[in-house]
Image: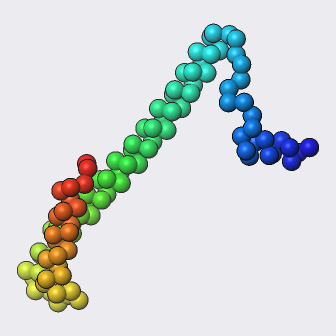
Amino acid sequence: MSYDIYSKWLFSLYPMERSINDPGEKLLNSMRTTARCRFHAAQRLKKQGDFSFFTTTILSLGLILIPLIQNAEIKLAYSDKALNMMQIFLLYQFWFTPQ
């Protein structure tokens, strides 16, 4: 019998909404659902904003550090042509990503 309960829960065989006849209870359920959806949307947008800020910061640091390292004549494992290509790639990603 417990397998039946778990299978109904696992495969979502319960009704989507329960029947409520009281208008006040319907309003409260609607308000709870709306508040929960808005909260989760705000959390998703905050995470997306944080990730976008982090990505923009890393790309900006790359664009700043590559020319400084080249001008300091620090010996790197990459050739100047490869570093220039990286700068072009970072610049393209920096300017054409939505912010």
Point out the residue furthest to the left here.
Answer: 71
Residue 24 drawn above or below residue 14 = above
Residue 40 drawn above or below residue 69 = above
Question: Could you tell me residue 77's position as x and y percent?
Answer: 23, 89
The residue lying at 18 percent from left, 82 percent from top is: 82
Question: Could you tell me residue 14's position as x and y percent?
Answer: 75, 34
Quarter of the image with the N terminus in it: top right
Residue 60 appearing in the image: no
The residue lying at 34 percent from left, 47 percent from top is: 49
Between 73 and 97, the residue placed more toward the observer is 97
Rendering quarter of residue 73: bottom left
Rendering quarter of residue 12: top right
Residue 38 is left or right of residue 1, and the answer is left
The residue lying at 35 percent from left, 51 percent from top is: 50
Residue 2 appearing in the image: yes
Residue 39 is left or right of residue 23, and the answer is left
Between 60 and 8, the residue placed more toward the observer is 8
